[in-house]
Image (spheres, rainbow, N blue to C red):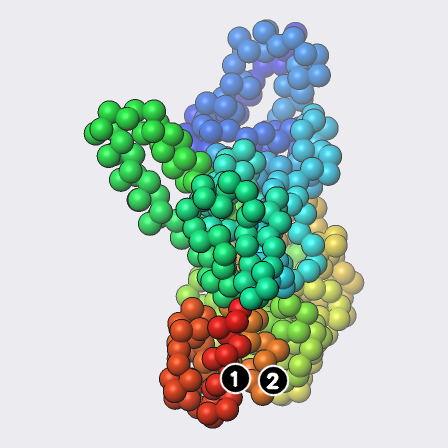
Amino acid sequence: MPVPVPSKLKEKVRQLPESPGVYLMKDRTGSVLYIGKAKNLKRRVGSYFQPSRRFRIEQPKVAAMLDLIADFEILETRSDSEAILLEGRLIKEWRPKYNTDFTDDKRFLHVRVDPEIPLPRFRLVRFRSGDRSLYFGPFAHSGLLRRTLQEMRLKFGILLGDAHPQQLEDGRWRLYDDARAELYGHPNIVSVLEYRERVEAACDFLEGKSKEWIGELEEQMRKAAENRNYERAAELRDVMAALRRTTQRNRKFTHAAPLVAEPSRPLEELRKVLALAQPPRRMECFDISHISGSFCVASMVHFRNGKPERKQYRRYQIKGFVGNDDFRAMCEVVGRRYARLQREGQPFPDLIVIDGGAGQVASALRAFLERGIEPPPLIGLAKKRETIVFSDGREALQLSGHHPGRLLLQYLRDEAHRHANTYNAELRRKKLRESVLDDFPGLGPKRRRLLLARFGSLDRLRKASAEELQEVEGIGPKLAEAIASQVRKV
């Protein structure tokens, strides 16, 4: 005999939004039984509590789960694609008893672009490696992603993973040696500079700057329909749909997402478990990121009342040393941030969160001690087990996976990580543009930056005369002639 549905759950279902998202079914102890996705949360979650469905279920395992459900939570998303990504992430993290999908090591696809090779290709991979490549994704719909890459090859003239370009005697490259050279509609023989400009445009597209292209396709579809070429119009419609779903921006998810709508509870819970004098209504979090093995950057994000306040976000390049040293970098950026706030008479946050363990926390605390500044409450959040590390010598603390305070801290930390990765990507893109000049004798970083700032793109630099190159500070006649000769060869 099925267990009757409690009236409180029926009322909770009635208040659900008709939007996409993920739902978590829980038992009486609060443990997660099952995680699922939905295009319409109200309709999907409500179906679990319909008596007619309970009598129709043929699988004993599912029927047993329904009798165990005592509560549920939802996480709204902006699209079905985001719901798929979030569902997969949460299932891998919590491994609920009644889920069978996503419990293996399969991952969603990413697009990988390696800027270290002369002709970067766009490859599909399932894992991000700790290398110097650019990564885009993850993408929820593998079929649409593959179709999008094929269209990008036509649009931008880029190389995918199946290409085998050949270098010619004059230093240029033949991209294809078969019929594709004519089909793709772009010059098949290119210099490294010309090809890298195609790569930049394609990377812009993958970062979401695709409205212009989709507008062009929409106009082509309209003309095809007017000319009664309905087959072509339908094909263009499908291409547009694939592009839109592939390139829509997916948020970096944590299971703290729903807490933003009701911040008072997690803030109060944090006050209790961290023994704070007041709820941490203003929080700042720092993260350190290494760039290309030689650059080191940092990010700082600011939350007010449990919500991101993006106008207060900051990012830093490390100035005090060269190399990758997380501890020194953390000490530097924390010191710079709060020394400036003190000079300007600005209030400090109620809580500082450091992405890292005891070493990073000690480095952040040292930044205050070295400057004679009284630090506000300061903790670290270590990724491995989401352990809270205190700066005052208290024993480390681990909160349950469903604790609202822990979820908010993870949301804050993940946002800092996202902000650092965005800066990471920008600098890697810059390296992609500048790498052709990196090893040029007598041309240091400052002159490279001045050259690119003056001409705007490598294509314009390649077309510049030696006289125009001499207009850049520090570029004399001999160096100008050498640069002009070199860039025209590639």
**Farthest residue, direction front:** 169
Residue at (41, 66) in percent of width and height:
311
Q: Position of residue 10 (x, y in %)?
A: 49, 22
Q: Measuring from the top left, give residue 343's x and y in whole percent.
A: 48, 86
Amino acid marked by disc 2: Pro
Taking 249 as reference, is 351 left or right? right
| Corner quadrant of residue 142 | top right
Give the residue at x 56% y 71%.
436
Where is residue 290 shown, x and y percent of the image? 65, 68
Give residue 482's mark: 1
Residue name at image x 70 percent, y 26 percent: 100
> In the rendered image of this protein, does residue 476 appear above or below residue 277?
below
Q: Residue furthest left?
A: 226
Between the C-alphas of marks 2 and 1, the distance is 9 Å
Q: Secondary structure at mark 1?
A: helix
Q: Nearer the viewer, residue 111 or 355?
A: 111
Quadrant where the N terminus sits is top right
Q: Nearer the viewer, residue 60 or 14?
A: 60
Label 1 Cα neighbours within 10 Å, binned few <14 / some 14-19 / many ≥20: few
- From the viewer's side, name the closer residue of 277 and 84: 84
Total count of labels: 2
Residue 235 visible here: yes
Name which residue type carries label 1: Ala
Q: In this orientation, which residue lies closer to the viewer: 427 or 249?
A: 427
Residue pictured at 50% horizontal, 91% vertical: 478
- Front tag of 2 and 1: 1
Above-or-below relation of 334 to 65: below
- Mark 2 and mark 1 lie on one chain; the one further toward the N terminus is 2
* Residue tagged 2: 441
Residue 109 in the image: above or below residue 225: below
